Image (cartoon, rainbow, N blue to C red):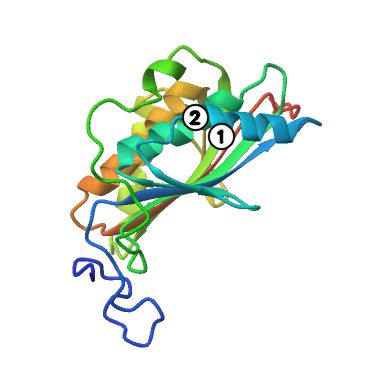
């Protein structure tokens, strides 16, 4: 089923994904977890096993994991996986991208019937630690895209995440719960923007970094 509201390629019959877009409310996040320790395999597999993915469609391969479904549940699962993988003193990074509305998306590989509370919310609510995060938002097809980016920059400021503009990205920092809530709020803001039909939010988050910022 073609997504008629997407202006970034659906009408191009020469493209390999022509006519394959979906108008269903499918959000997704593809991500890779990097625990920088000798027992990284145990940490990754343990976090994947501990995270409840009943509300999302999931697939893991040698490069990354993808969760697909409704945004609240996708965000819940990604957040839970990172928090479940946390080990005190272990430098760890999470690199990923949230996306919704891609003209090449398809209607399958998703869980859309789930309703109610996110399954991991209560289990990870008490986990707190500081993180650094950089992010880059791409509101596809929006002529006033820079205005949309400015809106979410001020959202970070209002949330107390100390946003700083760096080359090709915005940097924020704060408690891991606050940062994940903010990333989810950015996706929700893109869903509400009438002029944005497809967005990508790329992010990299880390904790326990040995790098000390210069004053």
| Residue at disc 1, secondary structure | helix
Quadrant assignment for the C terminus = top right
Measured along the vertical axis of the image, is residue 79 above or below residue 121?
A: below
Whether residue 93 is visible to the viewer of this picture, yes or no, is: yes
Q: Residue at x 53, y 26 (%)?
A: 50
Near mark 2 (Cα within 10 A), the count class, few <14, some 14-19 or many ≥20, is many
Give the quarter of the image for residue 180.
Answer: top left
Measured along the vertical axis of the image, is residue 123 above or below residue 191?
A: above
Q: Are marks 1 and 2 in contact (CB under 8 Å)?
A: yes
Which residue lies most toward the right here?
Answer: 38
Residues under labels 1 and 2: Cα distance?
Answer: 5 Å
In-front residue for pair 203/41: 41
Q: Which residue is mark 1?
A: 48
Q: Which residue is mark 2?
A: 51
Relative side of 215 to 55, left or right: right
Near mark 1 (Cα within 10 A), the count class, few <14, some 14-19 or many ≥20, is many
Which residue lies most toward the bottom here?
Answer: 14
Q: Residue at x 19, y 70 (%)?
A: 4
Which residue lies most toward the top here?
Answer: 126
x then y, percent, for residue 70? 29, 43
The dot on residue 146 is none
- Count of labels in the image: 2
x then y, percent, for residue 173? 53, 27
Give the quarter of the image for residue 116.
Answer: top left
Q: Residue at x 27, y 25 (%)?
A: 117
In-front residue for pair 19/181: 19
Q: Residue at x 25, y 67 (%)?
A: 6
Measured along the vertical axis of the image, is residue 185 above or below residue 110?
A: above
């Amino acid at each position: 089923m073609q997504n008629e509201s997407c202006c970034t390629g659906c009408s191009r019959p020469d493209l390999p994904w022509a006519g394959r877009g979906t108008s269903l409310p499918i959000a997704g996040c593809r991500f890779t977890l990097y625990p920088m320790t000798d027992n990284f395999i145990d940490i990754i597999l343990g976090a994947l096993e501990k995270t409840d993915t009943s509300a999302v469609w999931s697939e893991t391969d040698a490069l990354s994991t993808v969760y697909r479904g409704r945004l609240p549940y996708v965000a819940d699962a990604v957040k839970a996986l990172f928090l479940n993988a946390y080990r005190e003193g272990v430098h760890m990074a999470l690199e990923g991208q949230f996306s919704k509305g891609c003209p090449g998306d398809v209607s399958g590989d998703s869980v859309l019937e789930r309703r109610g509370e996110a399954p991991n919310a209560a289990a990870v609510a008490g986990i707190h630690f500081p993180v650094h995060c950089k992010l880059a938002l791409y509101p596809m097809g929006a002529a006033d895209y820079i205005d949309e980016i400015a809106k979410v920059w001020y959202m970070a400021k209002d949330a107390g995440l100390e946003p700083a503009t760096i080359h090709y990205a915005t940097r924020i920092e704060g408690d891991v719960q606050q940062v994940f809530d903010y990333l989810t709020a950015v996706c929700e803001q893109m869903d509400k923007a009438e002029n944005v039909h497809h967005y990508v939010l790329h992010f990299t988050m880390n904790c326990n970094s040995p790098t000390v910022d210069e004053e």
